[in-house]
Image (cartoon, rainbow, N blue to C red):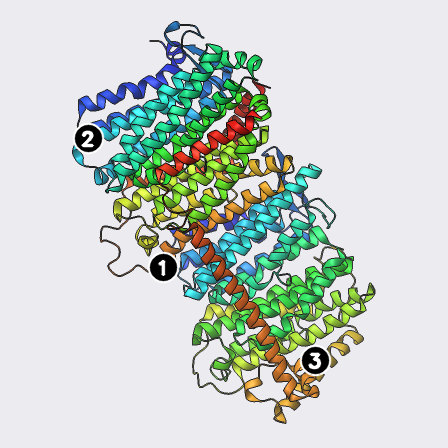
Amino acid sequence: MSATAVMAHLPALAVVVPLMTAPLTVLVNRPALVWRLATLSCLLTFAVAVGLLARVLELGPFVYEIGGWAAPWGIEYRIDAFNAYVVLVVTGVSAVAMPFARRSVEREVERDRAYLLYCAWMLALTGLVGIAVTGDLFNVFVFLEISSLATYVLVSMGRGRAAPLAALRYLVVGTVGATFFLIGVGLLYEMTGSLNMADLAARIPPIADSRVVHAGFVFIVLGLALKAALFPLHAWLPGAYGAAPSAVTAFLAGTATKVAIYALLRVVFTVFGARFAFGTMAFDVLLVPLALAGILVASAVAVFQQDLKRMLAYSSVAQIGYMLLGAGLVSEAGLTGGIVHMFNHALAKTALFLALGCIAYRVGTVTVASMAGLGRRMPWTMAAFVLGGLSLVGVPLTAGFVSKWYLVQAALERDLWWVAAIVLFASVLALIYTGRVAEAAYFRPAVPGGLPDRAREAPLSMLVPVWLLVGLNFYFGIDAALSAGVAGEAARGLLGGVS
Amino acid sequence: MVPPFVPFLIAALLVPALQGRARSVLVLVAPIVGALTLVGAPEGVAWQLDMLGLTLEPVRVDRLSLIFGYIFHIAAFVGGIYAWHLRDSVQASAGLLYAGSAIGAVFAGDLLTLFVFWEVMAVSSVFLIWARGTPEAIRSAQRYLVVQITSGVLLLAGALVHLEATGSIAFGHLGLDAPGGVLILLAFGIKCAFPGLHSWLTDAYPQATPTGTVFLSAFTTKAAVYTLARGYAGTELLVWIGATMAFFPIFYAVIENDLRRVLGYSLINQLGFMVTGIGIGTEMAVNGAAAHAFSHILYKALLFMSMGAVLHMTGRINGSDLGGLYRSMPRTTVLCIVGAASISAFPLFSGFISKPMVMTAALEQGYDWVWLVLLFASAGVFHHAGIKIPYFAFFAHDSGIRTTEPPVNMQIAMLVAATLCVGIGCFPELLYAHLPFATDYSPYDASHVLAQLQLLLFSALAFAWLTLSGLYPPELRSVNLDADWVYRRLGPRLVGSAREVIGTADAAVRSAAVGGLVRLGGWLARVYGPRAPAGAAWPTHRTVAITLVLLGGYILLQGG
């Protein structure tokens, strides 16, 4: 196949590569080999994503018809700046977390089940990328189920007895979300006879007064809000993140909720259109207060958590609030801030969870108490944690600052002083909950006999991915041309395509 | 030109990789290289770039920023010598980063760059407090950090408001009426220790390491003075704020036993002179503020270094535990007295050539009452910094402590600072030539010298008479001389009750604040803690119920 042919099939490749890897991992069934296969596949998918984004930036949005069947009968993949960006984030996080996973999984998952973890990981990646690239609502549901089912398996493989229960809880809530989404899609199909997003966007405005369409909207956005862990529908997230194996948590934290937010924004802005969603349905009246409540409550809860995985999970709930707040402000600056925060938060939070993975590998438990004296034992890991934490706080020169800059500007643009104040106040809370860890690690003396003897610096194969992400946090904090530039283009695409 | 903060940044990054003497040398090389970049630097915008859709000016040079740039380099150099013996890469790195960011802040041509350095200053400086390692230091460092970050948040908010309203992010004169002007003033005010916003300073500075306090005393507050001079010169409100700052810390300094905290209060008192000068806003007054910042950094560093030397050698810093050290630390004693003479504005010492500029400007502009307050503050500072500090540490009753002089590098650092204090005091033209505005002010005319000497001599006479006549009870040795004298004329009982009132009020405010915080913390923990309603793991059915409520509510309300 020539290079141009590969380029033409990039959208399909992004899904097919991880999808084909999944059965292969089961066939091979030898942990070391499976991991190599999965890493190769992740890197390949990431390369595809880079190609996709380059192509979109060069040529503009384009359509890929699966099997040559034209929409609205066939399924089409529609690539624009927004989903190419999201695919880049998802595959990028996976490509960084997978190399990390080998040592971490060796310690945390039984040897004879490890291949299942890699298999489920590849399926989850397939589903997440699929949601992003497809231009068909029912196809979104299919990929949503693929990724969700795989994620339940991943969560259940965590250490400890809590993992299966957390997975089950996640399954129940996730199924409710998926069902809501499906009901909404069904209602729309009944009214329009179409499942294609672009086609729906044209067919909905004439029937925008229909109660059925209203109900369809509500079902879909609530279903996706559940998957995105919008406060107060977030309760599954801390349990799932806390129980999953460390590498899996890092992978999910950077990808799963972001893709759900992508789907939510796609449906709200592209399918229904901003005028319908925010005019007729007054979606921002619901979204902005919930996002702000999430930012405040989840940050405050994070301050008091003793288990660091749960602490970061609650912090994720707050950060999801930032992303959706940006969308709820319905402006170019707001959407840019929300979308660029998907990117920046993926960088920061994955780095933090990977650092926790290093600690889990050497120490076992990841509580505030078990951090005491760790600054001397694991200097590189703890330094990475502190620097990643700075990005989460949004200190200047880190990626997190760029997002907050756009969000605060968007709030001020609409004279919402108090919204800007809440955003800035929450960064102080983030400083407190990450500072707590730094304080314990650097200034609390180790309890005699508290740290196991193997608590020394993490192996290089785990440190390199962590520091790569830490470096990127600073790179994109100083030169935001790529991250904020593409996010801006995505925001214009979302607003321009519909109004 | 190379941006002046770059040598510090590079050195801060290299320090952890070096050991021993190489590290200490690097700490000294950074300010030297940085200062060389300043020599002959042309005025104007030296570096411009476009970011986030804004035109930023990370390096802008003019006379106002240069004078602060010079003194910050000197302070970093002297602090580096003082810390030569340290084998702590965290403190060395943090100190360099802190000095570099303060220098970056005074050369920042726009509010966003200023904000970046503002935050780096906050984050790097906190390590100098943390490094002390005592539980009190760690707690105070956390309070310090929260206050500093709050200042940064306010600055960012103000900058955004300003940008939104004017479309410009440049950092020039703002004033209270400018959009975001109040927010930005509040941000500057926190770092400048405005009354009521000052407690982070007296809380945290005495807790820092002996070497850390020397750095802390130089940069944060003076960077804030610079930003005030840049943005708010001539804002009358600042005259009254400044006068209050010069006035109120005296009483706290009187009842304070920790000698480094006494210096913290006198730091605020000296800042009051600068803020007043900025508020008056004439060329003479702004010159005075800049000159006073310059000489203040030198003698305050010198005083903190001498007290740091005492703490380093004896492990104690409370006035009641010390005394009689002049026998074992004669050189430190002499150097401390030079600092004390400078802060008290003795002729031929640095305070004398800068402080009267502000006071003269106040008189010229008709602020007679302010002038009187400043005069009282001058007498007050002579007592609590000029007499109390050296007297209780080195003389007074013999505490029985026998020690030796501090390490040679500490002595050299103090000697350098003392030499500069005397040098500027004797040859003020050296400093005046670099002030923001051209000046022909001459401190050494007969009326200035006589007035200042009278003030000082009468104060000293009163002190001597009270001590000799036994009216100066041993346990009240920490009482402010001038205020003490007034109290005494009103009757000895009043002294006790005044002390009691101030002490009780102070304790009440502190305990109320602490109690409030504890209660707030308890309430937050009850609501957000791991077992509380918000923080505990929610059962699945609750999530499902919320989903249904949202579904029903949304459809019903939307259907109307």
Protein chain holding label 2: A
Residue bearing mark 2: A31
**In-image side of A352 versus B212 (left or right):** left
Residue A16 visible: yes
Using the image as rendered, state which of residue B551 and residue B98 is in the foreground: B551
Q: Amino acid at mark 2?
A: Pro
Work out which residue is located at the far top of the displayed protein and give it: A69
Residue at the (30%, 38%) spot, across then down: A166
**In-image side of A403 versus B285 (left or right):** left
Residue bearing mark 3: B456
Q: Which element type, helix, strand or loop, lies under badge 2? A: helix
The correct choice, above or below, for B136 with respect to B256 in the image is above
Residue bearing mark 1: A444
The correct choice, above or below, for A401 with respect to B295 in the image is above
Using the image as rendered, state which of residue A397 and residue A181 is in the foreground: A181
Q: Residues within 10 Å of mark 3 (few under 14, many from 20)?
A: some
Using the image as rendered, state which of residue B311 and residue B77 is in the foreground: B311
Work out which residue is located at the far bottom of the displayed protein and give it: B469
Residue at the (45%, 8%) spot, across then down: A72
**Residue B439 percent location from the top left of the image:** 77, 60
Quadrant of the drawing holding the C terminus of chain A = top right
**Splitting the image into 4 quarters, where does residue A19 fall?**
top left
Q: Which element type, helix, strand or loop, lies under badge 1? A: loop
Q: Residues within 10 Å of mark 1 (few under 14, many from 20)?
A: some
Cα–Cα span, label 2 and label 1: 39 Å
Protein chain holding label 3: B
First reached walking from the N terminus: tag 2 or tag 1: 2
Protein chain holding label 1: A
Cα–Cα span, label 3 and label 1: 49 Å
**Residue A152 percent location from the top left of the image:** 29, 31
**In-image side of A99 versus A140 (left or right):** left
Q: Amino acid at mark 3?
A: Leu
